[in-house]
Amino acid sequence: MISREAKAVCDEYGLGAREFYFRGRCGVLGECDADVVSAAAVFFPPDHVRQSWESGRKLPVERAVELYAEACHAWARRKLDGRDGCARIAELLQRVVENASPVGAPLFAGWRAVPLPGDAPARAVQLMHVLRELRGALHANAVIAAGLHPLDATLAAEHDGTPLGQRSGEMIARFFTWPEPYATPGPEVVARRAAVEETTDALMAEAFSVLSDGESDELIELLRFGHAR
């Protein structure tokens, strides 16, 4: 979303960053109404999703998905080419992806159907992206089941591993373009949000159950790449 590879696509095709983001990431849903995209991209304001999706219609979804995947692959080759372990990461993650249920995870299902590249760095990173879509969907389901509004869920937690070092709930809400001002979540909302994280982890663990304990430990060690941008 913020890589130089994604920016190059935006420049070439005359797209805004969020236009390419939604058309590329969510294009696996097909050429649909923006409400369908909002149903999957739960943590963004629906008005922002609609504006970005509609403004990006000049790029057909099939091509948008191809370009999004190609940007992912190019980033992977730039960052991970020559790193040991990419082939093994891809081997282990592919088993997890194949084991996971697509129920309640439309973007995961769509991206799982996208063909994988042949080289290890690109293959590993595309599989990481596919699993990120799985976790994102399961997390959204857990948030909704807990009766939390997506904005409240965003505000009521710290966020690790997010772009440009943005960690606080307010920073992420602003990044997602939720209108301000933001209410401070109370203790009950914070507690429900913490429980949602545990639920998400439990749901996600089912997909990883295909790996042995030794393979899980191996995967964790192999994935200690640090923050690569």
Image: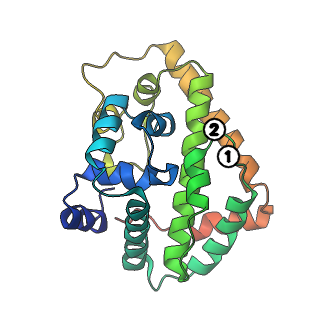
Identify the residue shown where x is 72% and y is 61%.
98
Q: Quadrant of residue 43?
A: top left
- Image coordinates of residue 152 in percent, x first then y, are 43, 22
Query: Can residue 164 be seen in the rendering of this structure?
Result: no
Quadrant position of the N terminus in the picture: bottom left
The residue tagged 2 is 200
Outermost residue toward the bottom?
Answer: 82
What whole-number distance in Å separates the C-alpha atoms at marks 2 and 1? 6 Å
Query: Can residue 115 be seen in the rendering of this structure?
Result: yes
Quadrant position of the C terminus in the picture: bottom left
Q: Which three-letter amino acid code belongs to the residue tagged 2? A: Thr
Q: Is residue 173 left or right of residue 203?
A: left
Identify the residue shown where x is 56% and y is 77%.
86
Q: Quadrant of residue 140?
A: top right
**How has the structure been colored for display?**
rainbow
Identify the residue shown where x is 59% and y is 45%.
106
Give the numbered dot on residue 95: none
In terms of secondary structure, where does tag 1 sit? Answer: helix
Crowd tier of the residue under label 2, counting other residues whose Cα lies within 10 Å: few below 14, some 14–19, many 20 or above? some
- Image coordinates of residue 147 in percent, x first then y, are 57, 18
Give the numbered dot on residue 204: 1
Q: Quadrant of residue 7?
A: bottom left
Q: Mark 2 near mark 1, Cβ–Cβ under 8 Å?
A: yes
**In the foreground, 22 or 211:** 22
Q: Is residue 58 left or right of residue 76?
A: left
- Image coordinates of residue 138 in percent, x first then y, are 61, 39
Identify the residue shown where x is 70% and y is 64%.
217
